[in-house]
Amino acid sequence: MTEASIATLIVDDDFRVASVHEGFVKKLPGFHVVGKAHTAADALEMAQRLRPDLVLMDIYLPDGDGLDVARVILDDPAPPVVLVISAATDIDAVRTAIQLGVVHYLVKPFGFTALAERLTAVRSARAAIADWPEDAGQSDVDQLFEMLRPPPAEPQSSDIEHLAPTLQLVYKSMSASGSGLSASEIAGQVGISRATAQRYLAQLEQIGAVKLELRYGQTGRPEHRYSITRH
């Protein structure tokens, strides 16, 4: 666990499901689980006490509605990011989640990749916010919102030659470098936006082709750099 690790609270009425989600989160670099809540009351108490950066929120809870819990949590002066994980697909629930400012809505059941894509998108956006330029313009805002989208669906092959052409270009650009590169540097070399580079790097990381490293400079703010894991 590093200083920049994202503290995650898991809320689900089923302790077995919560444990599965905990296992998913622990597989991802840059995240750690600070608690698991199985009721609305526990979720509110733990959110206040633990101050998580991210909450994975179920809707169906034995003593209340997870969206009501999310409403309270998001009303905090320093709210966490909330990602809904639920079997509910009715439009009222989805619309309410959007209105509350939930960043993603993942429908159960799902596999590790689906959650990993969304959490990695959250991590990328968080890194972009930390490095927000003083002269930010519309393109910076657009790229930040684009980062919150999951990476494009591509074959989850560990064989680099079977990846989509742009992914191969990103990988080859990194292979030609003797050291780790930032998303901005890769974007410049390949000719794509930084947000797009972040999304492709997230996918390469998920298949184990690249690894993320946090490097700390004089300001103490970590710099996100990526390097290949195999040649």
Image (tube, rainbow, N blue to C red):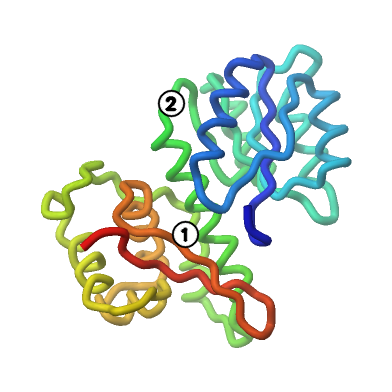
Q: Residues within 10 Å of mark 1 (few under 14, many from 20)?
A: many
Quick one: quadrant of the C terminus?
bottom left
Q: Which residue is mark 2?
A: 110
Name the kind of residue labelled 2 in the image. Phe
- Does the image show residue 45? yes
Asked if the residue under mark 2 is in contact with the one under mark 1, i.e. CB atoms within 8 Å, the reply is no
Residue 99 can be seen in this image: no
Query: In the image, residue 202 lies at what x, y percent?
Result: 39, 55
Q: Residue at x 17, y 54 (%)?
A: 160
Q: Report the residue marked by disc 1.
A: 147
Mark 1 is on which residue type?
A: Met
| Badge 1 or badge 2: first in the primary sequence | 2
SS for dot 2: loop
Q: How far, Cα to Cα, is label 1 from label 2?
A: 21 Å
Quadrant of the rendered image containing residue 226: bottom left
Q: Residue furthest left?
A: 161
Where is residue 162? Give x, y as percent. Answer: 12, 49
Residue that appears at 36% across and 64% down: 196
